[in-house]
Amino acid sequence: MRNKYQYFLWEDYINGMYNPPIHLQKEINLSIKIFNDKLYFKKCCLDVIDNWKISCDENLNNRSMNRIAWMGQSALNINDGIKEIVTKSTWKELNSKLKNTLNKIANETIIEYEKRNKSVYKKMGESLF
């Protein structure tokens, strides 16, 4: 899938999500805290679809990528600046029950994004919704 926008316009890129961490241990501790606060994690996921229009258009409309992982990485980055590499590293340390809960929250947010952006799927037909 070809990108619609140049990467330097993506809000996740602008927010430094792909940069190396400067304060690694601080980001690890904060990511664990956020992962364990399901209400805050959900709020951050919603912030992503409310505020990162270009990044969501690029990443959530691309069904060939792991959209749930991108949502989780973005949720930790949008308000707290946690880098995606830290999110990936911390994720490995979580138990299965928590991972399933967080994946469900991320997936529900993606479904909400799709409902809000039905026009994106007009070519595919309305049967998706």
Image (tube, grey):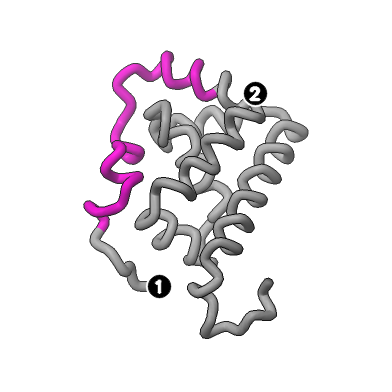
Main SS of the magenta segment?
Answer: helix
Provide residue 91's location: percent of width, then percent of height: 58, 32
Q: Amino acid at mark 1?
A: Met
Please give the residue where the numbered disc 2 appears in the rendered image. Answer: 36
Q: Is residue 59 above or below residue 34?
A: below
Residue 99 against residue 34 in the figure, above or below: below
Secondary structure at numbered mark 1: loop
Residue 74, horizontal then vertical, whole percent = 45, 41
The earlier-in-sequence mark between 2 and 1 is 1
- What element does badge 2 sit on? loop
Give the number of the mark in front: 2 or 1.
2
Residue at 68%, 72% in the rendered image: 129
**Marker disc for residue 1:** 1
Under mark 2, the amino acid is: Asn
Q: Judge whether residue 13 is colored magenta.
A: yes
Estimate the x, y position of residue 38 in percent, counting from the top left: 66, 29
Q: Which residues are magenta?
A: 7-31
